[in-house]
Amino acid sequence: MLKKLSILAGILVVLILLFNYLIMPIYVKHSRTVIVPNVIGMNFMEAKKILEDAGLDVKQGDIRYDETKPIGLVIDQNPQNQQEVKSGRRVYLTITGGEQLVDVPKLTGRTLRDAKFALEQRSLQIGEIAKKFSHEFAEDVVISQVIQPGSKVKKSTKIDLIVSNGPLLGNIIVPNFVGRNIDEVKKTIIEKKLKLGKITYQQSDQPPGQILDQYPKKDKSAKEDTSVDLVVAKKKTITEKPVEESTNEIIQEEIPTKPKEPVKENKKTEDKEKKETEGQDKINKNNNDKPN
């Protein structure tokens, strides 16, 4: 019996201790109210300490990117300052994140055009492009990128790329002929152990004889005696406009010099008058022939 009473007494002591040191503090904490301090304009860590000292819980909220303000500055709080809330209430702080950073996309395996589009979507730019011969990657496909995918960078950052120049077909690198004179280019083609291919002349504003385009393109690899086709500028042909007849001459041709209809009417009038005259003469003759 005494043993049971001792056990019950021990349990009671434990319950009293729990009530005094655990339950009551929680109840008192949540039953009392506090005034939310104003922490706008403070550093996040400083604001967090002030709010926790006031008996409030703190959590970081949204991040607003603004390159004109330092990182980690509190620019908004919820609940607002001077509000009366229960102790232990959670306060959300909105802080600045400085200049917004963007993720670098994966560009390897994409065409140069697709890579440029992917970078522009993230306000990034293509930097320097290095060409490299490759049997694995097709021409104009990105082999590698200097800044690795997933890296955080500032907007407008330039991403340097290594792009495939197609497979290595030979040990000759085709020079850039565009902009050079045809006579000079012919000599270079022979010196490079290449062969002059088809020449197409095209009217252009460029000086006659200047190369406008070429195939294979510059920096491509080629074997000996590979034909190089050229597009060469020629002088534009000036076409003369036909001389138009004057408007006055056309009008003169359309308007007759003498009206036709009035001529017919005058002729009819003259015939009528002639007949009337002849009739009157006959009457006068008959009257003269009658005896008195």
Image (cartoon, grey):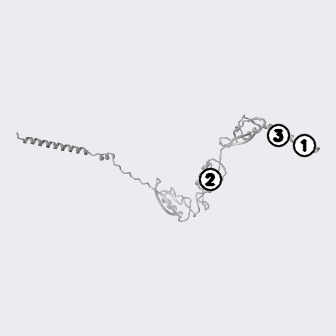
Classed neighbour count for the residue bearing mark 2: other residues with Cα under 10 Å, few (<14), some (14–19), many (≥20):
some
* Along the viewing direction, whichever of 106 and 23 lies nearer the viewer: 23
* Along the viewing direction, whichever of 23 and 12 lies nearer the viewer: 12
**Residue 57 quadrant:** top right
For marks 2 and 3, give the one nearer the viewer: 3
Q: Which residue is mark 2?
A: 160
Left or right of residue 135, residue 284 in this image: left
Q: Position of residue 268 (x, y in %)?
A: 20, 44
Q: Which residue is mark 1?
A: 8
Of label 2 and label 3, which has the lower sequence position? 3
Classed neighbour count for the residue bearing mark 3: other residues with Cα under 10 Å, few (<14), some (14–19), many (≥20):
few
Q: Position of residue 196 (x, y in %)?
A: 50, 63
Of label 3 and label 1, which has the lower sequence position? 1
Label placed on residue 198: none
* Circle 3 SS class: helix
* Circle 2 SS class: strand
Left or right of residue 123, residue 208 in this image: left
Quadrant location of the C terminus in the rendered image:
top left
Q: Cβ–Cβ below 8 Å for labels 2 and 1? A: no
**Residue 91 quadrant:** top right
Classed neighbour count for the residue bearing mark 1: other residues with Cα under 10 Å, few (<14), some (14–19), many (≥20):
few
| Residue type highlighted by circle 1 | Leu
Q: Residue at x 90, y 43 (%)?
A: 8
Q: Position of residue 87 (x, y in %)?
A: 77, 37
Outermost residue on the right side: it is: 2
Q: Which residue is mark 3?
A: 23
* Along the viewing direction, whichever of 262 and 43 lies nearer the viewer: 262
| Residue type highlighted by circle 3 | Ile
